[in-house]
Each structure stands twice: as C-alpha cells, then as structure tokens.
Image: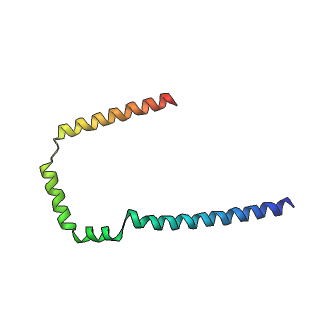
Amino acid sequence: MEIIQLKEELDNAKKEIHRLHDELEEVKNRLKKYTYPESSKKYYEKHKDELRIYKQEYYKVHKIDPEKKAEYNKAYYQRKKEEKLKNNLNI
C-alpha cells in the first residue's frame, strides 16, 4: 500500500516539475521581448560601423592615464579586500 502511494507521489512530483519547467520557459520567452527586442538588434546591425567609429573617437578624447588607471585598480582591490574581511568577521 505504501509503495503505491509513494509511486503516485513521485509521478505527481514529476508532473509538477515538468509543469514548472514549461512555465519557466514561457516566462523566459516573454522576458526576451523586453530585455532584447528585435528592433534593437536591427539597429546595431545597421549602424555597426558608425558605432565603432564613435567608440574609437570617444576613447581618444577620454583617454585615461595608465598611472591613474593603476591607482583606481589598486583602490578598488583594497576596498574589495576590506569588504571581504568585514564579511568574514561578521559570519
């Protein structure tokens, strides 16, 4: 008697898993409509060269000094290290 009930519960659990999986796929497909619309893709494909040139010009004008970049990276590393230590002490 218990074996039959366990098998039924297992079948119900499998059906529920499949239903949730299908629902997840449906939600993902609906979400794609807002996160990566087709119109955006078409725009970037059509204006690829213009955007590449704009990006190159931007980086020429807004050039970061290598010393400043190293300083920023060091400060970021130290800040992350301190946060990690604080998290470890709080745990």
- Colouring: rainbow
The tally of labels here is: 0
Q: Position of residue 29 (x, y in %)?
A: 47, 68
Residue 50 horizontal side relative to residue 4, left or right: left
Location of residue 76 in the rendering, given as x and y in whole percent from the top left corner: 31, 36
Who's the residue at 15% across and 47% down the image? 63
Q: Is residue 28 left or right of residue 79?
A: right
Left or right position of 69 against 90: left
Considering only vertical position in the picture, is 34 above or below 72? below
- Residue 21 vs residue 68, the one in the foreground: 21
Closest to the observer, 89 or 44:
44
* Residue closest to the eye, 86 or 43: 43
Q: Residue furthest right?
A: 1
Quadrant housing the N terminus? bottom right
* Residue 67: image location, x then y, percent: 18, 37
Q: Which quadrant holds residue 51? A: bottom left
- Give the left or right position of residue 40, taking residue 83 as reference: left
**Residue at x 15%, y 61% (from the top left corner):** 53
The structure residue drawn at horizontal position 46% and vertical position 32%, both measured from the top left corner, is 87
Indicate the position of residue 18 as horizontal and vertical percent values. 62, 66
Which residue is pictured at 75% across the width and 61% down the height?
Answer: 9
Residue 7 image-quadrant placement: bottom right
